[in-house]
Image (cartoon, rainbow, N blue to C red):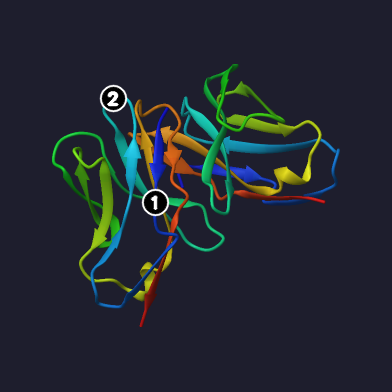
Amino acid sequence: DAGITQSPRHKVTETGTPVTLRCHQTENHRYMYWYRQDPGHGLRLIHYSYGVKDTDKGEVSDGYSVSRSKTEDFLLTLESATSSQTSVYFCAISADNEQFFGPGTRLTVL
Amino acid sequence: AQSVAQPEDQVNVAEGNPLTVKCTYSVSGNPYLFWYVQYPNRGLQFLLKYITGDNLVKGSYGFEAEFNKSQTSFHLKKPSALVSDSALYFCAVGVVWRRALTFGSGTRLQVQP
């Protein structure tokens, strides 16, 4: 699993509340990613990071922000959660020409 | 822009029969191609990749895939399916491997005993 953990693993929240998801890695990888998985869409990139304080947008970044103040942590924030952000969120890292994924966070926005 | 198409939402095959899960892609430049598998309530697990070299790539659990540049395809195959192969399979493409991958919508493989 390339030492990737995500927290929380499950969360239920209400529309309009802020939510932060955490991805933590233990192997000092430079590149980290946040994806969301929805039925019929596969995985879609939200944001990625290529180093501390270096981040960029993916294809579905609206409504999301990220921060990376330490190599090991990549945070995804929903500033004001909406029902359309109900999804499973996966963090990933790049290593050895592969991407390795965390276990996922299931987020439900009511 | 890069894209991936997995034309079949579901593939059904009997145990012991060969299986194929289809994938076509579109990129500008030389593609990096991947197959991942996802079991229920789990993350994605890497199966195999094509970066360069031999067009036939062998991966985990007896799976293989053939890179076909002229047809822009990267179909996943296995000579003899197992019930335990039943899962959701994703094809993905990248151009620069350190950047994010673009995933297909996924194909659910159902292997009947």
At 25% across and 52% down in the image, what residue appears?
Answer: B59
Pointer 2 chain:
B
* Amino acid at the residue labelled 1: Gln
- Helix or strand or loop: what does disc 1 sit on? loop
Reading the image, the residue beneath label 1 is B6
Which callout, 2 or 1, points at the residue further toward the start of the chain?
1
Q: Residue furthest bottom?
A: B113
Residue A69 in the figure: left or right of residue B15 = right
Q: Classify 10 Å Cα crowding around label 2: few (below 14), some (14-19), many (20 and above).
A: few
Question: Which quadrant would residue A65 be assigned to in this image?
Answer: top right
Where residue A98 appears, x then y in whole percent?
Answer: 36, 38
At 31% across and 73% down in the image, what residue appears?
Answer: B82
Q: Is residue B63 visible?
A: no
Q: Is residue A85 visible?
A: yes
The answer to whether marks 2 and 1 sit on the same chain is: yes
Where residue B16 appears, x then y in whole percent?
Answer: 25, 77
Where residue B30 appears, x then y in whole percent?
Answer: 26, 28
In depth, the one of A41 and A11 nearer the eye is: A41
- As measured in the structure, the alpha-carbon distance from the residue carrying label 2 to the one carrying label 1 is 20 Å
- Helix or strand or loop: what does disc 2 sit on? loop
Count of numbered tags: 2
At 59% across and 37% down in the image, what residue appears?
Answer: A24
* Amino acid at the residue labelled 2: Gly
Question: Which quadrant would residue B41 be assigned to in this image?
Answer: bottom right
Pointer 1 chain:
B
Q: Residue furthest top?
A: A53
Reading the image, the residue beneath label 2 is B29
